[in-house]
Amino acid sequence: MTKEIERLGIPTAQISAIYEFAMTTGANRVVRGCRIEHVCGDPELGAEKDYAFGMRIVRTALAALQTAVDGPTLFDPAEMLEA
Amino acid sequence: MAGPLRVVQYLNQFFGGIGGEEIASMPLQVQRGAVGSGRALQPLLQGQAEVVATLICGDNYIHDQRDKALAVLTEQLQALQPDVLLAGPAFESGRYGLACTEVCKAAQAAGVPALAGMHPQNPGVESGRPDVLIVPTSASPADMQTALAAMVRLALKLGRREALGPAELEGFLPRGVRRTYVREAPGYQRALDMLAAKLTGQPFLTEVPIHIPERVAPAPPIARLAQATIALVTTGGLVRKGNPDKQVASNATRYFRHSVAELQSLSARDWEAYHSGYFNHIVNKNPNYILPLSFLRDLEGKGEIAGVYPWIYALPGVSTPVAQAKRMGADIAHELQEARVDGCLLVAT
């Protein structure tokens, strides 16, 4: 589905915990999510840190949308600089 | 079957020895026996078959005057009554390959078994699927002998009306036709034999070919995020609480879109997940985990993005056939494109 949206020229970031699989299927901008059951955050961290973590994932995804790529590329929130 | 098989070959103007591009508009003509590159075909038939006639047509004519050309071809085949028709080999030539495919379809319609030869990437292959038998060749006419030899093997079987086995054994490109039959050894034995072969560097034939997913050209990046409208899509199975739309939990054939124009966040009171592929209870407590609306609203409030597209799209992405996902993705893509959305976040579980 990501590829169909991308095909019409809309940059799309796919946020997924199974990020390697997302890259194999050909999604160009892949963002590493936390876990399948809670992709954009982690309830184990407590409310404040959970939200901060989710925000970091979303910021990483938006950074991916602003980045030119040649093919499937992984954007890992752990490696993104603090906004 | 008494006597040699009667073979007709179809060639374009070049391989028929008439001329090049300048004569690509020549109409279909018949010549007796093997002509042009067909002269290499006759010896390969080794007395088991005879090229009784060659049909030659310009690559432009057969496309521009398709119906007329195929009508003449059908007439000729009805008069000649061949046992089999060979079209090409066309190698990489797109127009020629497409012509060969059309000729084979017309021949089959007239009751004459037919096959074509061309490179696997020739557009004639796609247009021939699933009805036309195509023998793969290299891209280069320098390999004419090899190509013809491969075509002859299959042509003789077709001409004798013998039943064909699987594509990989008979030497034609798979057409997506699946026939069940009983294999000689049980599955575990075949699997172990395959593994042993793989580990010792021996050749083996997979029973489950992996299809490489298509690549799509990356869309250009967003130049100014502060002016961008971002859309949200999820395959995490987000539904309104109680699932009033009655979305399914797997193998979805449709998605639902919901308006979030008035919402700052997805609350557990109004939303939940219904997706049989993962443990839904955590998302049920905070649906933003699979559709990060709260975060985007936060950023919108800070002016980091211009806005969130008011429609969100959801389905349970489990047991979804690729073709369905593609169709649903294309539908959503068109809506987003019409709405001039600048970017999209898609959360997959």
Image (cartoon, rainbow, N blue to C red):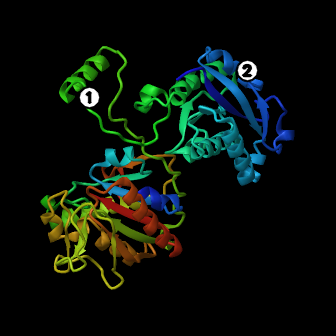
Residue B23 found in image quarter: top right
User: In terms of depth relative to the viewer, which is nearer, B209 or A63?
Assistant: B209
Drawn side of residue B125 relative to residue B273, left or right: right
User: Above or below — where is B189 with respect to B341?
Assistant: above
Task: State the image coordinates of residue B229 (x, y, percent, origin top left).
Answer: 46, 73
Q: How many marks?
A: 2
Disc 2 from disc 1: Cα separation = 41 Å
SS at mark 1?
Answer: loop
At which x and y percent is residue B262? 33, 85
Residue positioned 58% across, 38% down in the render: B112
Q: Looking at the picture, tell me which residue is in the foreground, B42 or B12.
A: B42
Q: Quadrant of the C terminus of chain B?
A: bottom left
Residue drawn 73% across the image and 20% down it: B39
Q: What residue type is disc 2 on?
A: Arg
**Residue B94 position in % (x across, y down):** 67, 41
Task: State whether residue B118 appears in this view.
Answer: no
Q: Which residue is mark 1?
A: B183
Q: Chain of mark 1?
A: B
Residue B45 located left or right of residue B260:
right
Quarter of the rendering containing residue B184: top left
Query: Which residue does the numbered mark 2 point to in the structure image?
Result: B39
